[in-house]
Image (cartoon, rainbow, N blue to C red):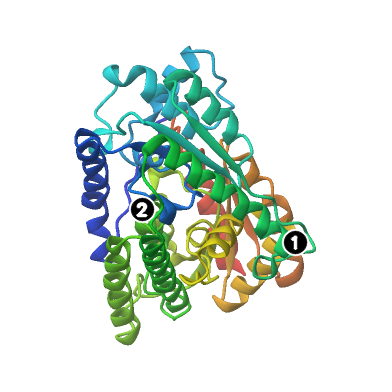
Amino acid sequence: MKKGTDRAIPSLTVTKAIYPLVKQFYQEAWQAKEQGKLICWAGVGDPRELFWAMNLVPVFPENFSAACGAKQVAGNACAIAEAHGYSRETCSYFRNTFGYMVGKDELPPPPGGGMPDPDLLILTVNSCHTRPKWWRIMERHLDVPTFILEAPTIPWDMRRNHIEPHYLDFVVEQLKELVSFIEKHTGERLNMDRLAEAIWLGDKASQLIQEVYRLRKAKPCPVGAEDMMTTIFPIIVLRGTRESVDFYEKMLQEVRERVETKTGVLAHEKFRLLVDNIPPWYTKGLYNYFHQFQALAVAETYTTTFGWESRMDPGNPWESLARSTISNWLNISFREKGEVLLQVAKDYSIDGAVFLVNRSCKVYTGSNTYLSNLLQREMGIPSLILEADQTDPRDYVDGLVKNRIDAFMEMLASR
């Protein structure tokens, strides 16, 4: 059967600016490399503001792999990694990155020209605990200095807005060690004024995208997952920069105008959906498929991960960075996830939930059953379970997935 490669059809004008922004991001990284600036390959949960303050140029293998998925060039890179002995059960972000590292000359052109070779590898372990293996494999292959920072998981009896001080102190101490590591290898001293500015900009971008999320409570909803999954790029890789603030100011203005004029994604919105897990980047148009049933994804867990509502304080930079580092959606307990989803379901008038069984991300997928059962038990909200890897399209069968969507929407309509 033919594999699905549906491209998303956005509703917002601002969404169309994302791919040029992605291309520009990678081109500027290459230019920085040519100018003698140091490049680090970093994790998407790393303290970007610290990098900007130390004149270090970060690129993010996870985001790069997502972009390769969206450009539909990741399958071949994953196959190269498997030919080198890495199991197909390992994360496709890793396999795409490794395939790119060792076989870039035999692959199609990657987004923006790809990632320039790094001078440093930096990772914060604050969600997926298999990533240290990934970074150590890259360290062996690339032979560059590597720093791995550990952020503790938030236990079931603690919440992101009430993190105990010793958790924050533990991360602050490691952040300062990271600064020493960067200073040692770059000769660049930490500029506290630049750090405060980056934290202010990062917090501003988070506030703006949080306001976009809040406006999605409106009926009809002004923006769906097909736009949100694309427009999170700036908050992931450019948080702490003026570019991210400028982008979300434009996005917020457009969304506000749509709410004021009651312009929804759908002319006749009937079903409001919640989506959980990393999207299948190679077929984001899957979200548009729901539109024919007058159904729209009005809330997602993934898009809120990078702009959580906890504020950052430029006057208290170390604690702000530590709190931001710990407060990852995948770093909290099932209990807190359940509390959040029940509140979201109420606030956004959710009719049904879509949970993706993601072969690559076991830590994300692990809560699917608990959360779907919770929504059904507490609020009578039914769930659809779909199987789709985040980056590797080779096991995805479009027809089977859409058949399951058809049946689920028929059930929702009958209710």
Dot 2 amino acid type: Trp
Upstream in the sequence, badge 2 or badge 1? 2
Where residue 296 sits: x, y (%)?
A: 45, 65
Residue 403 as seen in the image, left or right of residue 69: right
**Dot 1: within a 10 Å radius of its alpha carbon, few (fewer than 14), some, or many (20 or more) residues?**
some
Dot 1 amino acid type: Arg
The residue lying at 36 percent from left, 25 percent from top is 100
Q: In this view, does 335 lie above or below 102?
A: below
Q: Name the residue under label 2.
A: 52
**How far is mark 2 from mark 1, CA to CA?**
35 Å
Where residue 24 sits: x, y (%)?
A: 21, 47
Q: Is residue 266 above or below residue 258?
A: above
Q: What numbered label is drawn on residue 335? A: 1
The quadrant holding residue 200 is: bottom left
Q: Nearer the viewer, mark 2 or mark 1?
A: 2
Residue 156 as seen in the image, left or right of residue 389: right
Where residue 210 sits: x, y (%)?
A: 45, 72
The residue lying at 45 percent from left, 70 percent from top is 314
